[in-house]
Image (tube, helix red, strand yellow):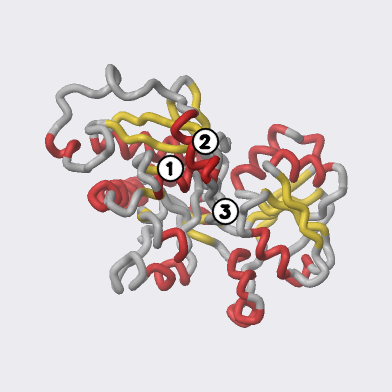
Amino acid sequence: MPMIRVRSLAVTLTTMLMISTVAACGSDGDDTPKNVSAKTAALGTLTPGVIKVAVQPYAPYTTVQGGKVVGLDGDILTYVAKKLGLQIRPQVTDFAGMLAGVQSRRVDITIGGVAWTADRQKQGLFTDPPYYSPPAMAVGSGKTYRTVDDLKGLSLGTVEGYVWVKSIQSVPGAKLHAYPDATGVFDDLGAGRVDVGFLDPLIIIAAQKQRPELKIKTEYLTPPTAAEVKARPAYAYFQPYQTGFYLPKKATRLEKAISAQIDAMYTNGEMAGLVKKYGGDPEQFLKPAADVATARRGVDRPGNWTPPSIGQ
């Protein structure tokens, strides 16, 4: 997720099973809310009054502490759930398990910087974007990389399954280093074995504070031009992307209700406040690129859809 996370769609049977066996909260039964309103029940969650959410530990986007989901995405969902009269019940899995849980309808939703893609929306529903992700790079202090051309011939790291893998593989002369998690990227970046790490921006910002010995900084890649993307389609993943909360295909009422609350959070300042809380810049996170609307219009949004933005 997410985080601000761009990951591949591959899902295995193993990860589909994980989400049903590893839970961060109690099982259904005694925890089922009583006196659920008709309006809340009409949202169609698997258990009336409860929203089951699949997450991967990915601070500062999603972390489960004391049975509660915290982090940027967690705080957004907590705000939304309160407005809708829902209790949050988290289940912990990996990223593939998050997608599998939604697509098999084992959970009501997954969060954590999940990137909208045309392929993913075929198997699930995306809310309006809770935030957008600029193309962030972790680089060593004293080094500067601005454009895709600057990346040619370098050692570039990211996490296995992220679609940045595809982008990196398309950079002439670049060497891909794929890791199980962000820690491996940072370790090798600090050791000089990797020149640039492609990770979600809040992850890099947090690492700068928590691991100053790495001597890294955050830079934002100048998005490739339309001509560059046409020549190398995988470069599209080097552009800013829209995140979303991801729900099962049949959860249309729930998706619409959550999207309405997300849109309201842009207007009332709640979203900007949460982005700032976790070290992000609202100007970077809450203003969509021009292609956000065109990507979804006529696909999973009406032809006149306008993505949420601050300053409208």
Vertical position of residue 97 compared to residue 178: above or below: above
- The structure residue drawn at horizontal position 31% and vertical position 36%, both measured from the top left corner, is 81
Earlier-in-chain disc, 1 versus 3: 3
Residue 46, image x, y percentages: 28, 37
Q: Secondary structure at mark 1?
A: helix
Earlier-in-chain disc, 3 versus 2: 3
Q: Residues within 10 Å of mark 1 (few under 14, many from 20)?
A: many
Task: Tell me if 37 is positioned left or right of 48 in this view.
Answer: left
For this orientation, the residue located farthest to the front is 13
Earlier-in-chain disc, 1 versus 2: 2
**Which label was assigned to residue 93?**
2
For this orientation, the residue located farthest to the left is 38
Q: Amino acid at mark 2?
A: Thr
Residue 221, image x, y percentages: 67, 62
Q: Nearer the viewer, mark 1 or mark 3?
A: 1
**Which label was assigned to residue 101?**
1
Residue 62, image x, y percentages: 51, 36
Q: Secondary structure at mark 2?
A: loop
Q: 34 or 127: nearer the eye? A: 34
Vertical position of residue 25 compared to residue 213: above or below: above
- Rounded to the nearest angstrom, the CA distance separating label 1 from label 3 is 15 Å
Q: Quadrant of residue 107?
A: top left
Q: Amino acid at mark 3?
A: Arg
Q: Which residue is mark 3?
A: 7
- The structure residue drawn at horizontal position 49% and vertical position 66%, both measured from the top left corner, is 289
For residue 47, say whether it is visible: yes
For this orientation, the residue located farthest to the top is 30
Do the numbered discs 1 and 2 sit on residues whose CB atoms are within 8 Å? Answer: yes
Task: Tell me if 197 is positioned left or right of 95 in this view.
Answer: right
